[in-house]
Every structure is written in C-alpha cells, then in structure tokens.
Image: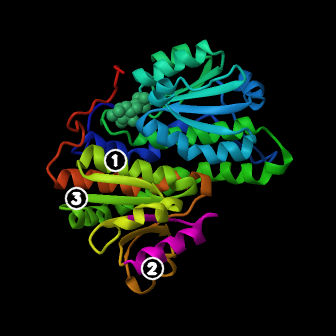
Amino acid sequence: EQINKGNYEHYMQKEIHEQPESLTTTMRGRLIRRASSKEKTVLLGGLKDRLKTIRRSRRIVFVGCGTSYNAALAARPILEELSGVPVTMEIASDLLDRQGPIYREDTAVFVSQSGETADTLHALEYALENGALCVGITNTVGSAIARNTHCGIHINAGAEIGVASTKAYTSQIVVMAMMALAVGGDSISHQRRREAIIDGLFELPNKVREVLKLDREMKDLAELLIAEQSLLVFGRGYNYATALEGALKVKEVALMHSEGLLAGEMKHGPLALVDENLPIVVIATRDACFSKQQSVIQQLHARKGRLIVMCSKGDAQSVCPGDSCRVIEVPQVEDCLQPVINIIPLQLLAYHLTVLRGYNCDQPRNLAKSVTTE
Ligand code: G6P
C-alpha cells in the first residue's frame, strides 16, 4: 500500500504529505511519557548496549552523502549539547579522498536512507579498519550499511520512491534527536531541556500537519519564481542544514541553480551577489540566532535584496516591517526540532517549481535514488 501514489500525482508529493504519519512511525515505541511517574525517556533498542561506549568516545563523526549528510548536520548541535562529546561532519567521498583520521576511540555514525550508497559504504569499511565503533542509521532493513555496522537505528519512514529524499530526511533528524537524548543520558543539568524535546517530539506530527497547509502558498511562490535562474537560501545554527537541504531540493528536482549558505558567511562573499533581482530565502525562525538573522535581513534590505523570509508564526511584522518582503510563517517548535518544520515549505516549493517548469520530480535528470558506484 506504501508503493502506490494513492490520490497524489507524484511520489514526491505523496511522500511530502505523508510526513505526519512517517514521523509517527519513526517514533512509535521509542518515546515514553508516563503520566503516573512523570517519567519521560527514549528507548532505542539498537543502541542500548553501546550507549556507554558512545558517551565515552573521543568524538562522534557523522558520515553521509546528499540529504542524509544534511540531516546529520541538522542534528549535530543537539547531539553536541546533550552529549558533551565533540561532533564532526564528514561527506563520505571527502573522508575517503583525504583518508582522514578515524580512531579507535571514535564513534562513527553512517547515515543513509538506502543503506547502499557506495561512498558511505566504503567510508564504513574504512572506519571499521580503523577500529571505530560504527553506528548505522538507515531506512532499509537488511541493507549493507545496516548489516555491516556494529549497532544502529532504523528510521522506519516507509519506502521512499521519489529520487529526491523528503520524508526520510525528517525521520532521520528525529532519529538523531532521539539518539542525542539517549546518548545524553539522565544528567540532572539537562533534565528540563530533555523533557521539552520529548514533549516537542510528541507534538511534532501535528505541527507538520499544520505546516503542510502552506501547500497553496508555496505553489503561488513557485509561480512567481518559475523563470528564475537562481535562488539563494540563507540559514544558520539549527537551520544551516535547512538552507543546504532546501537548495539541494530545488536544484535536484526543479533543475534551478540554488545555493544554501551559512548566513554568518554572507559578508565574506555572497553579499556581492545581492541586487533587486536575485530571490533570496532567509530562514529566521525563533531561536538563539534570531537577532543575528534580523540583522542579516536588514543588511539585505539595505542592498535592495529580493527577500522571502521564513519566520515563526506572528513574527511577520518584526522580520519584515511594512510588507517589505514576502513572508512564510511556520509553527514554532523546540529549537532543535525546528529543522523538521522549516524544510517542509521548501520541499513544497521545490515540488511545485518542478511541476510548473515541466520536469519530472520523481526521476530527475541524471540522478539515481541509490548511487552504488563511487
Ligand atoms: C543520491 C540521492 C539523494 C540521496 C543520496 C544519499 O544522490 O539522489 O537523494 O540523498 O544519494 O543517499 P542515501 O541512500 O545514502 O541516503
């Protein structure tokens, strides 16, 4: 039943819209909230015997490609915060090109929807040879990465058919947030934060349902952008990953040049591109980086930038006084889960742009769902 399109025209569209359900399945049986004892915890069967080793690692290294790499990047800050272990990022092919250092005291986490991507699989073989503890996060039971890692977590998002990953991305982030909770353990200092994240996870499917109502608005925006050559996306903090992933969606399916940029780097180059023609998405939802993003918006305004600002509900006036730009208002959730919400309007935008431009969103030109050659 998962494999047909149901009432949808395309798999990508179906997979975007089924995220409330896929996220529910990802979390099923893993989040525990007992009213009687006020206990709130996470249970990840595939990791439980290795948690101590992961906590004692010298560092945690995330390894992946494409969307899976971006999902790990979104989860990195919360894993650092709750575990206290340094977390570094590796694109699988780059780790192999450099033969970068991997140590016995490292935990290497391999993130892959298919579990079969050659670059990630070869990086896993390399990390195994170097003696690291290897953890797999995949959507495919029995895949090579699931089989060859020491332990791991299945994301249980259901089969993903569209070449551009959508529902697997949000499920990967949720699994890695749960992993951060599990690795963080039960330290008193993080107790309130942990509880807020667990409550946030319980609420997430409903918030995703709410953000999916932006479908029509994103179609209108796509109509406006249909003939553009290029689209920039600025994010930072938790939503640097959202900028990279949003831009990746637009380029892989809508065949439009798009770049995700770290807003903190804007003044070190990208600012030169800003004029009244180039459309720029700025992600400025509420979190610790909000005031910095507000000043980015002001600087872009000062250069007459053509802005589309994503902000938390109710913030339209404070981010864009006097209707000076287009605004996408999204529901606010716990900051580390906000990337799950914020990517959805960009997935919808990429989808509608693709259909309006007459391209095939399920089988984009030159791309494959699973790249099994290096
Ligand atoms: C291919 C797909 C991407 C995907 C990447 C990693 O390039 O087109 O959508 O993100 O591989 O795939 P994986 O299965 O390892 O997550």
Determine whether, in the image, residue 103 is placed left or right of residue 66. Answer: right
Ligand 1 lies in quarter: top left
Question: Residue at point 51% right, 28% down?
Answer: 95
User: How far across and how far down the image is residue 237, in percent?
Assistant: 58, 56
Judging by the rendered image, the residue that carries numbered circle 1 is: 249
Judging by the rendered image, the residue that carries numbered circle 2 is: 320
Q: Earlier in the sequence, mark 1 or mark 2?
A: 1
Question: Residue at point 59% right, 15% down?
Answer: 128
Determine whether, in the image, residue 318 is placed left or right of residue 306. Answer: right
How many labels were placed on the picture?
Answer: 3
Amino acid type, residue under disc 2 in the picture: Cys
Q: Is mark 3 within 8 Å of ligand 1?
A: no
Q: Is mark 2 within 8 Å of ligand 1?
A: no
Magenta stretch: residue 335 in it?
A: no
In what element is the residue under mark 1?
helix
Foreground of the two, 20 or 182: 182
What's the distance in space between the residues labelled 1 and 2, CA to CA? 26 Å
**Disc 3 vs disc 2: which is toward the camera?**
3
Instruction: Tell me the quarter of the image containing the N terminus.
Output: top left
Label 1 with label 2: CB-CB less than 8 Å: no
Q: Is residue 59 above or below residue 242?
A: above
Question: Residue at point 61% right, 57% down?
Answer: 335
Q: Quadrant of residue 176?
A: top right
What's the distance in space between the residues labelled 3 and 1, CA to CA? 15 Å
Q: Can residue 142 be seen in the rendering of this structure?
A: no
Q: Over which residues does the magenta segment extend? A: 281-303
Judging by the rendered image, the residue that carries numbered circle 3 is: 229
Instruction: Tell me the quarter of the image containing the C terminus.
Output: top left
Q: Is residue 321 above or below residue 192?
A: below
In what element is the residue under mark 2?
loop
Amino acid type, residue under disc 3 in the picture: Gln
